[in-house]
Amino acid sequence: MARRRRTHRNQRSKSNRSVRVNDGEKFDGFDQMKPVWSFSSADRSGTESLFSDRACQDWCVDILPKLRDFETMTWAEIKRQTYSGKKGRRKTNHHYVDTERLPNNAKQRLIHLKLDDHDQLFSLRLNSRIRIYGIVVGHVFRIVWYDSDHRLHPSRAD
């Protein structure tokens, strides 16, 4: 009788890999899970603060409805969403952003918030101009910034 071959974890697709969180717990296939929001890392006083006057004005109209919409999707579904960019090219709505590519003031803010040990933030596109930036830990999105005018990581020309 032939032996069955085992599938090794390192053969899994990149989006379905195991992720270790701070307490050592593993999340297998977190892309198949729905997001959970955490505000514990939110910048409370910077210009991109979720607690800014602008964010407070936009909370009920732009932010909360989109977060509720995202809760009905898995991370994989969120990451697959695209829009038509300039010249008709399809672009991803939501993606990782290297912290090295952020403006210097944002890098300094990460240091101040003691979040500079992260190489990437995840950007959620709420509409054509509004973004929420945060840290993905397992299926939890730890919100850091609210970018009302897409200034933290502007789109490159197509």
Image: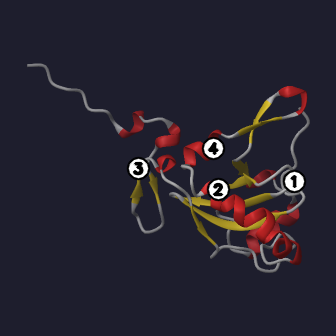
* Residue at mark 2 to residue at mark 3: CA–CA distance: 24 Å
Can I make out residue 99 in this image? yes
- Label 1 crowd bin: few (<14), some (14–19), many (20+), radius 10 Å: few
The residue that disc 2 covers is 69
Mark 2 and mark 4 in contact? Answer it, CB < 8 Å: no
Question: Which image quarter is the C terminus in?
Answer: top right
The residue that disc 3 covers is 28
- Using residue 22 as the reference point, say whether residue 101 is left or right of it: right
Q: Amino acid at mark 3?
A: Asp
Count of numbered circles on the image: 4
Mark 3 and mark 4 in contact? Answer it, CB < 8 Å: no
Mark 1 and mark 4 in contact? Answer it, CB < 8 Å: no
Choose mark 2 or mark 4, whichever is in front: 2
Answer with mark 2 or mark 3, whichever residue precedes in sequence: 3
Its colouring scheme is secondary structure
**Disc ID at residue 79:** 4
Q: Quadrant of residue 151?
A: bottom right
Q: Amino acid at mark 2?
A: Asp
* Residue at mark 2 to residue at mark 1: CA–CA distance: 18 Å
Can I make out residue 134 in this image? no
Q: Secondary structure at mark 4?
A: helix
Answer with mark 2 or mark 4, whichever residue precedes in sequence: 2
Q: Amino acid at mark 4?
A: Lys
Mark 3 and mark 1 in contact? Answer it, CB < 8 Å: no
Is residue 53 or residue 111 the one in the foreground? 53
- Label 2 crowd bin: few (<14), some (14–19), many (20+), radius 10 Å: few
The residue that disc 1 covers is 129
Q: Secondary structure at mark 1?
A: loop
| In this view, 141 is above or below 11 | below
